[in-house]
Amino acid sequence: MNRIEFNSLVIQHSDSLKLYAKNFTKDHDDANDLVQDTLLKAVTYFNNFREGTNLKGWLYTIMKNTFINNYRRIVKTNSFITKEEEISPANLVVSATKNKGEDKFVMEDINTALTNLSDEYYIPFTMYFEGFKYHEISEHLNIPIGTVKTRIHVARKAMKKTLSAYKYYA
């Protein structure tokens, strides 16, 4: 079966697809959108259809999966977005407790602790933090890998000591 024959067979099933779509959506316009999505996917994935397969069943499966995926996407989106005029007490607590002012002070303390490190510890530590591997830092600084590991370890300990006030900060 070539693509043109396949497309005409798919179009012939559009009326039954509309009836099936209304079972899912309960809305005429949404049903038409679902049918369009289904037809588009069927035509796009023509190569996945095997001759001898029940075309109507194949189209119904595409429609059902499309509807489920769209529904999941909508539910997931709605769980992240508050559409209410007033923020609920639960959301207000989260909003009020996690603001940027506190984070700014923490970042200032981290930057102060970093600047207190000498260059021999600061450079390997920040390179490692930025994602460089031990051997890359070693080659860049022309020092042995063991020295790189030691300097990073010492820098971590110094940072940990300087930032001990944040030990239980979450």
Image (spheres, rainbow, N blue to C red):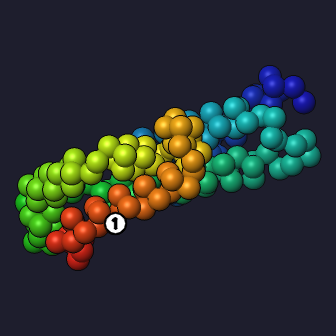
Q: Nearer the viewer, residue 143 or 22?
A: 143
Residue 82, x across and y down, in percent? 21, 57
Horizontal side of 32 relative to 87 (left or right) equals right
The quarter in which the N terminus is drawn is top right
Kindly identify the amino acid type of the residue bearing the numbered disc 1. Lys
Vertical side of 112 occupied by 137: above or below: above
Q: Is residue 61 left or right of residue 4?
A: left
Q: Nearer the viewer, residue 68 or 56?
A: 68
Q: Residue at x 21, y 71 (%)?
A: 164
* Secondary structure category for the residue under label 1: helix
Residue found at x 80% / y 22%: 4
Q: Residues within 10 Å of mark 1 (few under 14, many from 20)?
A: few
56 horizontally vs 15: left or right: right
Residue 78 in picture, x, y percent from top left: 32, 56
Residue 11 is left or right of residue 67, and the answer is right
Q: Residue at x 65, y 37 (%)?
A: 41
Total residue callouts: 1
Quadrant housing the C terminus = bottom left
Q: Is residue 72 visible?
A: no
- Residue 153 visible (yes or no): yes
* Residue marked by disc 1: 157
Q: Position of residue 87 (x, y in %)?
A: 10, 62
Query: Please, which residue is most extreme toward the bottom here?
Result: 168
In percent of the image, x 15 and y 62: which residue is there?
98
Q: Give 2 or 80, whichever is nearer the viewer.
A: 80
Q: Estimate the x, y position of residue 33 in percent, counting from the top left.
A: 49, 39
Establish if 73 lies above or below 46.
below
